[in-house]
Amino acid sequence: MKSKLLIVDDDEEIRTQMKWALSQDYDVILAGDRPSACQAFRLHRPPVALLDLGLPPQPAGTQEGFAALGDMLSEDGLAKVIILTGQGERKNALQAIGSGAFDLLTKPVDLEGLKVILRRSFHIAGLERDLRGLDERSPQNTFEGMLGSSRQMRALFGSIGKVAATDAPVLILGESGTGKEMAALAVHRRSARRNGPFVAINCGAIPENLLESELFGHEKGSFTGAHIQRKGLFECATGGSLFLDEIGEIPLALQVKLLRFLQEQSIERVGGRQAIAVDARVIAATNADLTEAIGSGRFREDLYYRLAVVVLRLPALRDRENDVCLLAQEFLRRSAEEAGKPGLVFDQNALKALSCHPWPGNVRELENRIRRSVIMADGKRLSDRDLELDNHSKETSVVSLKAARESVEREIITQALRKHAGNIAAAAAELGVSRPTVYELMNKLRITKG
């Protein structure tokens, strides 16, 4: 199902053009004035809206546009409203951001830039709604939407609370699927910057030739296609936090610019010569082994120490004691509601299988597996076969479950080490975990390179 996007503009031609350009990705709803915009917003509850400030009956002014912005945010405080503004309207733009707008774009709108901003807006809107839902439903086991009652997660929650009280850069380490972005958002929401923007970018998902402009912005005419001046994500995060996921994927040339920002708290746009002061906290994350990247020359050591002022290590799901069943029950409830199948429960074999599985994909794998099983389920009880985990369901005791898990882990790690002639880094890369994780498992399972 496509996400709903509301476009509010008094120019019918602009509305039609935008719908044509964006309808492949979104369920586009159109409005030409404040009353119709507010009615559509209440009816459809879009998580993201594009809003032109100049609306009838005073299209040359901004009164109706600001009133529409206030109405939308009063109706849904989590909505992301992106303001469309003309050239030379800096005062209006600043007022809009101060009134709660999520971002702003200058007309004429660059379509590719708009699509990037929309993807980020929908992503953050979805993440915040998920976090709020978890907080409301399971307050006793949540911390800013992060669900867990294990000793490891309680320690993490305590660390986040301490880190958030400072303004130091934070480096979050953890395997893929452990919830690094949720941890970053928790740091932001617990900090003094909570009322500022939380801007997130996956550094590995943006082509290298576009990443610099995306992060630092560009001046008009700085390269082919740069028809207007554009702010980068650093400037968009002013007063808030900038989350750089997959920080290890940033090319060396950009690592220099990032280091300069951390040292001087200022940036230069692409094609610019002026240093621009930016007040933004940097939170970075990676599932890669940065120490290995430093050794191979792919990551700057001085940047690592600037980023790693405070390090948060997210535990793998297999190490989180009894959290698997707690998370599974919550994901089942949510997925059943989404699929229109309330009342689904796990049978005993399913719960045993969930506890036994090693979860190499961590929380993300658990959520996706449960969502898929709910969609495919016919009855009211989910079995180990529905979860496609029936090969683990023959264990009958806690001791045997632990032994089975260690046996599987030992066999997989031993095979990887044998294949790569004892090379820890190569084995870790194949297994999709960090090198320190392999060392910990080898020590735990008494595995030697030979």
Image (cartoon, rainbow, N blue to C red):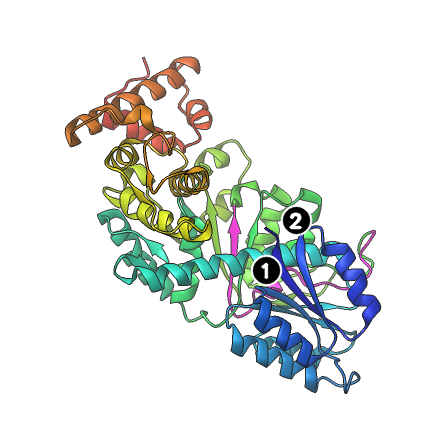
Determine crowd level at label 2: few under 14, some 14-19, many 20+ residues with C-alpha closer than 10 A: many
- Identify the amino acid type marked 2: Leu
Which secondary structure, mark 1?
Answer: helix
Location of mark 1 (residue):
121
Location of mark 2 (residue):
211
Query: Which residue is depicted at the point 62% across and 60% down?
Result: 4
Residue 173 horizontal/vertical position (percent): 40, 44
- Identify the amino acid type marked 1: Ser
Query: Of residues 328 and 435, which is closer to you in this image?
Result: 328
Please say whether residue 205 is visible from this viewpoint: yes
Q: Residue furthest front?
A: 379
* 425 part of magenta stretch: no
Q: Quadrant of residue 106?
A: bottom right
Query: Which residue is depicted at the point 36% across and 34% down?
Result: 359
For discs 1 and 2, the disc positioned in front in the rendered view = 1
Q: What is the quadrant of the C terminus in the image?
A: top left
Query: Which residue is depicted at the point 71% across and 65% down?
Result: 274
Judge whether 283 appears above or below 65 on screen: above
Please say whether residue 168 is visible from this viewpoint: no
Q: Earlier in the sequence, mark 1 or mark 2?
A: 1
Judge whether 258 appears above or below 385 on screen: below
In the rendered view, does 217 fall on the left or right side of 256?
right
* 239 part of magenta stretch: yes
Residue 221 horizontal/vertical position (percent): 83, 58
In the rendered view, does 410 fall on the left or right side of 64?
left
Q: Quadrant of residue 413?
A: top left
| Residue segment shown in magenta | 224-245
Query: Which residue is depicted at the point 55% across and 36% down?
Result: 298
Residue 208 horizontal/vertical position (percent): 67, 43
